[in-house]
Image (spheres, rainbow, N blue to C red):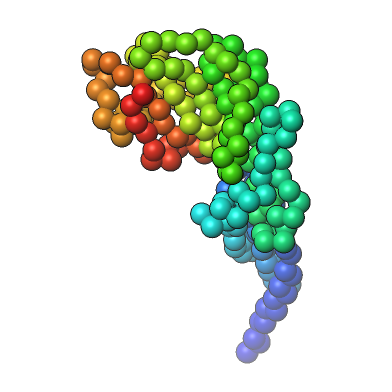
Amino acid sequence: MNVHKISKIAIPIAVSTLVLTPFVFTTSAFAAEYTQDYGIMSQNTSVEEVVLTDMDTIIAGKYISINQENLFVLNPNISQELTSEKVALVQNQISQTNKYIEAAKQDTQNTSTIISPSGQESLIQSGLLRGAGVNSITFHWNYARIKISAGSLRNALLVGFTAGSVYAPAKIVQLACGIAGIGTTSIKNGIWFDYNYFVGVLTGNAGKQ
């Protein structure tokens, strides 16, 4: 009786890919396995995600400031405290936020400001004043505080709201009203809420104007 043996060769291949989402850096390890007799290949993939924790965000804040062009800048010394992957995530968020800020400079309908983690605040654009609240956006490096006046809120509940090129969908505005305790049938107050536009979620903070 002949015993048919199959020998296997495992070839490890390491690939790192920066995912252009705000918080995730993935490192994928592939092991390709071949059988000599049948030429069959199977591939096992494991994915390790690198994320920014709350502590990472606090650390990053120490190295982020506002320059003369009213844009966020990152001090390269951050690499002394965070890994290169996490620094890349922080830089990606800052770059994306700066694009929104550049667009906000052209938005004359809404007031736009920028605020650094240390509390340094600067006016980007002065918009129109309205009764019962204002329409405005304040850029933090990793989220924005959006304010919608009572006069604009009804329409925002139906189609969403755009301030400084940042669009908050209607469902986000509706959730914010729920958190703030603002009724959607008889609107008397404006609203404010903190919105993470990178991933499209509320941070949990909202209130009445």
Seen in the picture, residue 8 relative to 192 is either above or below; the reply is below
Quarter the C terminus occupies: top left
* 29 or 8: nearer the viewer: 29
- Residue 38 visible in the displayed image: no
* 27 or 21: nearer the viewer: 21
* 143 or 58: nearer the viewer: 58
Which residue is depicted at the point 67% across and 78% down? Answer: 6
**Residue 40 at what x, y percent from top left?**
68, 64
Query: What number of labels is visible?
Result: 0
Seen in the picture, residue 177 relative to 55 is either above or below; the reply is above
Q: Going by the image, does 140 lie left or right of 129?
A: right
**Residue 29 at what x, y percent from top left?**
66, 63
**Residue 14 at what x, y percent from top left?**
72, 63
- Residue 71 visible in the displayed image: yes
Which residue is depicted at the point 23% across and 16% down? Answer: 185
Q: Which quadrant of the view contains residue 132? A: top left
Q: Going by the image, does 103 lie left or right of 172?
A: right
Which residue is depicted at the point 38% across and 40% down? Answer: 204
Seen in the picture, residue 207 relative to 41 is either above or below; the reply is above
Q: Which quadrant of the view contains residue 156? A: top left
Seen in the picture, residue 102 relative to 90 is either above or below; the reply is above
* 87 or 67: nearer the viewer: 67
**Residue 188 at what x, y percent from top left?**
28, 16
Quarter the N terminus occupies: bottom right
Which residue is depicted at the point 53% across and 16% down? Answer: 110
Q: Going by the image, does 60 lie left or right of 163?
A: right
